[in-house]
Image (tube, rainbow, N blue to C red):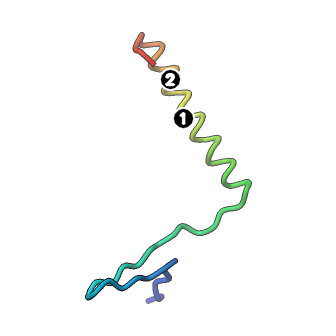
Amino acid sequence: MEEEKYAATYKFGNTTVHVVAPKPKSKEEIDRILEEYHKAGWAIIHELIEKGEDV
């Protein structure tokens, strides 16, 4: 089994907190993800308008 890797580990008394962070993404990946979010948001807005609901 592969050992877990954490971005940070903190100890508070008897409690250990492991912080897990996503793998770094390239500028192109981030731009693609943001574009997908925007497309999904606009699709929702257009659907609400078609239904006559407030936006």
Disc 2 residue crowd, few under 14, some 14–19, many 20+, Cα 10 Å: some
Q: Which callout, 2 or 1, points at the residue further toward the start of the chain? A: 1
Point out the residue furthest to the left here. 14
Q: Is residue 27 above or below residue 5?
A: above
Vertical position of residue 30 compared to residue 51: above or below: below
From this viewpoint, which residue is outermost toward the top?
52
Q: Is residue 44 above or below residue 18?
A: above
- Is 40 left or right of 29, judged from the image as shown? left
Q: Which mark is residue 7?
A: none
Residue drawn at x 40%, y 14% as measured from the top left: 53
Three-letter amino acid code at the position of disc 2 = Ile
Q: Which residue is depicted at the point 40% across and 79% down?
A: 18
Residue 27 vertical position relative to residue 35 in the rendered view, above or below:
below
Q: Quadrant of the N terminus?
A: bottom left
Q: Position of residue 41 (x, y in %)?
A: 53, 32
Indicate the position of residue 2 as horizontal and vertical percent values: 48, 88
To which quarter of the image does residue 27 belong? bottom right
- Image spot of residue 24 (x, y percent): 63, 67
Q: Secondary structure at mark 2?
A: helix
At label 1, the amino acid type is Ala
Where does the image place residue 39, in percent across and percent down from the top left? 59, 34
Q: Are marks 2 and 1 in contact (CB under 8 Å)?
A: no
Q: Residue furthest right?
A: 28
**At 48% from the left edge and 14% from the top edge, which residue is drawn?**
49
The residue under label 2 is 45
Disc 1 packing (10 Å; few <14; some 14–19; many ≥20): few
Could you say whether the residue bearing mark 1 is in a helix, strand or loop? Answer: helix
Q: Which mark is residue 40?
A: 1
What's the CA distance linking mark 2 and mark 1?
Answer: 9 Å
